[in-house]
Image (cartoon, rainbow, N blue to C red):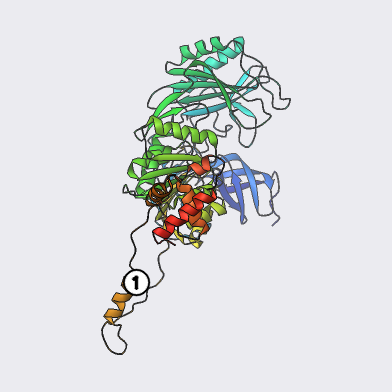
Amino acid sequence: MRAVQKNDMVELTITGMTAQGSGVGHWEGMAVFTPLTAPGDVARVRIVKAAKNFAYGRLEELLVPSPHRVEPDCPCFSQCGGCCYRHITYEEELRIKEGRVRDALERIGGFRGLPLRPILGADSRDGYRNKALLPLGLKKDGSLSLGFYAVNSHRIVDCASCKLQPEDFNRAMEAFRAWAAQYGDPVYDEATHSGRMRRLYLRKGERSGQVLACVVVNGNGLHHERELAEALKAAVPGLSSVVINSNRDRTNVALGKKCRTVFGSGTILDQLCGLEFQLSPLSFYQVNRTQAERLYHLAAEYAGLTGQELLLDLYCGAGTIGLSIAHKARRLLGVEIVPEAVENARQNALLNHVENAEFFCGDAAQAARMLADRGERPDVIVLDPPRKGCDPDLIHTVVEFDPQRVVYVSCDPATLARDLKLFSQLGFVPVEAAPVDMFPATAHVETVVLLSHKKADSYIHIDVEFGEGEGKIPVDSIAKRAEAYKPKEKVTYKMIKEYIEAKYGFKVHTAYIAEVKRDLGLPMYDAPNAVEELKQPKKHPTPEKVEAIKDALRYFAVI
């Protein structure tokens, strides 16, 4: 039989789903990916693209509908790139997502038999998104197009009402359309980099009910901003802020870094895990607050904090995960490479009176250096990387920290499985995984994984006999050796600093002591408050202070 070609018509039974939400069927051993199909469908499919081992199809006729199929309740479903599971039951969607996680762990990671909790579903598929970033364009008749991008394109699908977002957003969109028709500036054109209005951006605090509207512009502002604010206030009772975001760059990045408030405070408040968060247009915040709370409760359970641990939160963002469990740890250190997010995290810590948290801008390697200078080691590490997963160097750094536990929060099962495989090779193995449906009706699924040290494959039992005679170990010899290796009184950085101040009349920074110890090849323990070294251009102790530190180390018999 000849290979399948473009425009061929084939009959398929859909047996699975891709990570993007397309149905998978097979024709003569070749996988055919077809959007808008569901597991159990028997369909007539037209081939639109054929490769050597797979093909893409378009649904032409549904011959036998799947028992899991339902009528889509959104007129934009077949065009918009948002929802891909609105044509199947939620129960089947959860089954697909749980299976996707299990398949990735087994097929990519090689973890067969890894305990996997049942997926944690949402109470509702609809109205959960607390953020909408809506591109603006023009229809053929010149009127405003406001909605979402079609799948794999920059073509805007005009949408008057989205099922995933709250009704407040739909009312705000309607009010913006009316204002734009009367007062609006020219719409931005990507091809020519001309025009002014680029995007309408909406945020809502689920618990507070506050709504923020932001218009992204190719410039510094809009004409008739006051009229816009009045129109939005009239349409959205919870509206508390209207903001103009300036983005003059020729880029696909949605937001610029400069914001100007037209009405209100420029921020909104929301509550998550008992904490309050202040959100600006630039703040990172979970899109589904309710499911985020459930996700964070899982992360807290896996972290197993007792109040004595140093918790390291890598990819901490605005600090939401770390701050939500900081009260269970001795201290929280959050690390994030985006400066704006770090500032958000610090503000959120102050807002919630979290005094045992510290955030700094950097990567995992910088975190490692800082903790080494302090003589500290994290007891528990939380990872929440972007969709691309972790860099291998970061994984090696995490393993070198040698924590008791690692909690990995993933938004992509494939990169998760890949990273877990490397962790396992380096001595940290997954203990349990728990999928969470953070974004119902979409293809995305989150997973929380607990990792711990690899257990020994086998054990050797040795019998030791103490006493006098052949083959026995003399007790007095053991006692003498034990006395020789008896630990001396622990010498702290505080003791060293007090000795130097009393003898020499000047103070030395903890980081200076740590640097001298490191240069001498001494072990590094308990060096608190050395972080200032990373917050400013690095300074080194003077020769006078180096000699004073060495003197103190000799006095306490450290060297």
Q: Is residue 23 above or below residue 400?
A: above
Give neighbour class at mark 1: few <14, some 14-19, many 20+ (Cα, 10 Å): few
Q: Is residue 224 above or below residue 26?
A: above
Q: Nearer the viewer, residue 488 or 318?
A: 488
Residue drawn at (31%, 76%), measured in percent from left and top? 480
Q: Nearer the viewer, residue 31 or 538?
A: 538
What is the x, y in percent for residue 327? 33, 41
- Does residue 240 appear anywhere in the picture? yes
What is the x, y in percent for residue 185? 64, 14
Q: Is residue 265 above or below residue 76?
A: above
Label 1 residue SS = helix
Left or right: 136, with 375 as reference point: right
* Residue at far bottom of view: 470
Which amino acid, by three-letter code, is at mark 1? Ala
Residue occupied by mark 1: 484
Q: Is residue 517 above or below residue 359?
A: below
* Residue at far right of view: 192
What is the x, y in percent for residue 163? 47, 28
- Does residue 95 appear anywhere in the picture? no
Residue drawn at (39%, 34%), measured in percent from left and top? 290
What is the x, y in percent for residue 212? 48, 22
Dividing the image into 4 quarters, which one contains the C terminus? bottom left
Left or right: 457, with 217 as reference point: left
